[in-house]
Image (cartoon, grey):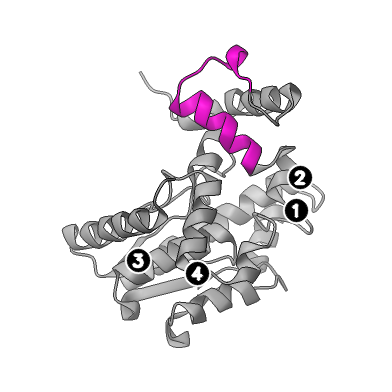
Amino acid sequence: MRNAAQEITQITQFLTHTYAKHGIAHAVVAVSGGIDSAVSLSLLARAVPREHIFPVLLPYGRQNMDDAKTMCVWNSLPKSQWVERNIQSPVNALCSVLNISSNDHLRKGNVMARVRMIAVYDTAKEKRALVCGTENKSEHYLGYFTRFGDAASDIEPIAHLYKTEVYALAQELGIPQQILSKAPSAGLWNNQTDENELGFTYEQADQVLEQLIDKKKSPSSLVIEGIDQEIIQRIVHHVHQQAFKLEVPYSR
């Protein structure tokens, strides 16, 4: 990204225009305390009057939401507008009905993501609001999202930005250091981090994705200084393995 300040201006204008175009005054956004939701919320607060923004906090059990609350305060959103829903009870009930064990992290994580989506959209229905998403370009092409879960939204302010570009925007916005320095995590189980689960860093992935997606280079031709060929091919394999998520539903 060449100019983070200009990017912030353009995204803010996009958000303002989209909400005005559809005649919807209110905005709902799930705030986890991670970098993506922090940036999305902060951009939204520049585009929509703060009294029309409803941040939704969705902890599972005793999950720490301090960073999410910090971002709500940092963006001067009154506590009366915060919506907090603990998803533990509905998630556990569904896992019981579906015979999902507590050790099956992936299946349970998908249920958690989809229950959060239900809560966010129910809040949007109640407030007559558009759901502001938090997906970035890296997660999109890596398929690192739950279909009909965290990928569900009405408007996406940062979907065109790679994860490293989201961090650049966060720096420009002045996002608190505690948010900037924490390891990216979907918060779906204890000690889960994106990069440990993926097996490579976002910095590595973004360099490969830029060559593969933006410059349309063939996987066999990719050579990137500072990144082992094994890591490059692991990222390429992950993109190809998860590509179906970008194509479904299949139809004639």
SS class of the residue under badge 1?
Answer: loop
Quadrant containing the N terminus is top left
Residue indicated by mark 3:
125
Spatial CA distance of label 1 from label 4 is 26 Å
Residue indicated by mark 1:
192
SS class of the residue under badge 4?
Answer: loop
Residue visible at 39% across and 64% down in the picture: 43
Labelled disc at residue 196: 2
Residue 45 falls inside the magenta stretch: no
- Say which of marks 1 and 3 sits in front: 1
Spatial CA distance of label 3 from label 2 is 36 Å
Spatial CA distance of label 1 from label 2 is 7 Å
- Please determine whether, in this image, residue 168 is positioned above or below residue 51: above
- Say which of marks 3 and 2 sits in front: 2
Spatial CA distance of label 2 from label 4 is 27 Å
Pick whichever of labels 3 and 2 is earlier in the sequence.
3
Labelled disc at residue 174: 4
Residue visible at 63% across and 20% down in the picture: 223
Pick whichever of labels 1 and 3 is earlier in the sequence.
3
SS class of the residue under badge 3?
Answer: helix
Q: Is residue 138 left or right of residue 13?
A: right
